[in-house]
Image (spheres, helix red, strand yellow):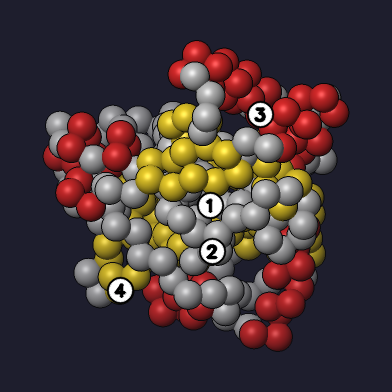
Amino acid sequence: MDIRPLTGGLGAEIFGADLRDPAQLDDIRDAFVRYSVITLRGQTITPDDHLEFARRFGTINVNRFFKRLDSHPEIAIVLKEADQTGAIGESWHTDHAYDHAPAMGSILHAIETPPFGGDTAFCSMGAAYDALSDRFKEILNGLHAWHSSRHVFGAVQQDSEATRTGRVGNADLATQDALHPVVIAHPLSGRKGLFVNPQFTTRIDGLSEAESDAILHMLYSHCQKPEFQCRVRWQDGDVTMWDNRATWHKAINDYHGHRRYMHRVTVEGCALEAA
Ligand code: SIN
């Protein structure tokens, strides 16, 4: 297989791989740990192949809020129809940050891509942490932050287009809040990285609202530097797997009037340790 880094910060495209082949798993896993985001180009797979590949990395975590594939309920549907305006996952986020054991990663299979746009953007939380000053790192190292599903998937979203069109639901299940270290030691690589994100993080524990807001806003603006980012340009059949403990991601909603249809499988993670 031919592994080509996308940027200096994170991400790689992999050509000539077949995710159905267990003999290729070690190389794919090594690339995943090294690059945090890997795109396996041109896969010809069924939903069962998708699930079998995901199970090689861990137990599947069935998302509570996304519409599920009728034939394979462990697969979440990520869909925007041509006449819809909102995409799923448009804000920078980390999947399942609101869980006590946030997901290890997600594996997204492109079934139908628009003729232009619809990329997914990623940020490296390790690169963003490395670029902070040593004094500021010292301040962050002792902190923990709260994350929640309530304000994103709870009752407040009942009137959203995603809920009305059935793409997101189960508002009554949005009851999760979790406390995680602001700086984690990555469970696989040990690399230090930030673990706060604009969508699900609500507050830094023990600080006033003004103090917490100031630090979070500063971090969010810092993390969005292009130097820490890569973008995946999709083609039908591509499969992208991202490391949820090392990245943020965001669906770019710039393909209005066209359909984009993906299948997502999310793999269980573990409780996060402070760096
Ligand atoms: C997601 O946030 O899981 C969806 C990302 C995408 O559709 O590009």
Residue 235: image tag: 1
Q: Earlier in the sequence, mark 4 or mark 1?
A: 4
Label at residue 269: 2
For the question of whether residue 274 can be seen, the reply is yes
Question: Which residue type carries mark 4?
Answer: His
Q: Is residue 15 left or right of residue 59?
A: right
Amino acid carrying mark 1 in the image:
Gln
Taking the view exactly as shown, the residue that stands out farthest to the front is 206
In whole angstroms, how far apart are the C-alphas of marks 4 and 1?
A: 23 Å
Q: CA distance from mark 2 to mark 1?
A: 28 Å
Residue beneath the point at 77% across and 31% down: 137
Given contact means CB atoms under 8 Å apart, are the residues at marks 3 and 4 in contact? no
Q: Nearer the viewer, residue 143 or 33?
A: 143
Which residue carries the number 4 mark? 72
* Kind of residue at disc 2: Gly
Q: Nearer the viewer, residue 157 or 48?
A: 157
Q: Earlier in the sequence, mark 3 or mark 4?
A: 4
Return the disc, 3 or 2, that comes first in the chain's sequence: 3
At which x and y percent is residue 220? 59, 25
Alpha carbon of mark 2 to alpha carbon of mark 4: how far?
Answer: 21 Å
Please say if the residues under marks 2 and 1 sit with CB atoms less than 8 Å apart. Answer: no
Q: Is label 3 or label 2 in front?
A: 2
The number of callouts visible is: 4
Q: Is residue 81 visible?
A: no
Read off the residue under disc 3: 223
Are discs 2 and 4 less than 8 Å apart at CB? no
State the image quarter where residue 132 is shown. top right
Residue 154 in the image: above or below residue 214: below
Q: Residue at x 68, y 78 (%)?
A: 25
